[in-house]
Amino acid sequence: MSKALRRHIRRETVVSFIINAIINGLLAWWLLKQKAMLSLWGQEGFAVDLVVTGFIMLFLIASIVVPINRRKMTRGALPAHQWGSGSALQNLLRKLPRRLPLLALCFALFGALIVAPLTIFVMQAVSVTELTPMTYSIFKAVWAGALAALMIAPLIWLATAPQEA
């Protein structure tokens, strides 16, 4: 990977973390601040919120990041990404659809069906089943920021990789 692409990914990762942490943390606080306690499960449990956030956030991020970076590459502002010699992650990414709606859906499903349930499982395993609105808002800010940041490099690789037959 070129130095320019690596630098671009590093900057976009930091920006994505900050933006998504702020948006998700503030939104959680604004919507939940009046509640005394939030439970993991139940009709208004935060487990559902994590699943929904994982889906919507990753769908939106993929829908924004991929076209912007494809355009930058086409205009010559970013170098093309050349796939390495076969890391498991890159092999998986190469199998994803290139059409934006389907690619965004794949990332959204990953957030909702893999990341969120794993997070919920860990919270249940360590007996974190209730949080104050402030604690949950801070947790959600860090969780959403980290998830968004972790998805930036794969999305930029996909956006700037050559089309495969």
Image (cartoon, rainbow, N blue to C red):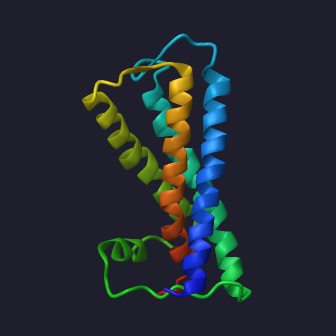
Instruction: Residue 1 in the image: state x and y as whole percent.
Output: 49, 86
- Residue visible at 62% across and 68% down in the picture: 11
In the displayed orientation, state which residue is furthest to the right: 75
Instruction: Residue 107 in the image: state x and y as whole percent.
Output: 48, 58
Q: In the figure, residue 96 lies in which quadrant?
A: bottom left
Q: Height in image: 94 above or below 155?
A: below
Total numbered labels placed on residues in the image: 0
Q: Height in image: 19 above or below 35?
A: below
Q: In the figure, residue 12 lies in which quadrant?
A: bottom right
Instruction: Residue 140 in the image: state x and y as whole percent.
Output: 52, 36
Q: On the picture, is 75 further left or further right than 47?
A: right
In the displayed orientation, state which residue is furthest to the top: 36
Instruction: Residue 2 in the image: state x and y as whole percent.
Output: 53, 88
Q: Height in image: 65 above or below 76?
A: above
Q: Height in image: 119 above or below 36?
A: below
Q: On the picture, is 16 further left or further right than 41?
A: right
- Residue visible at 53% across and 57% down in the picture: 149
- Residue visible at 47% across and 36% down in the picture: 50
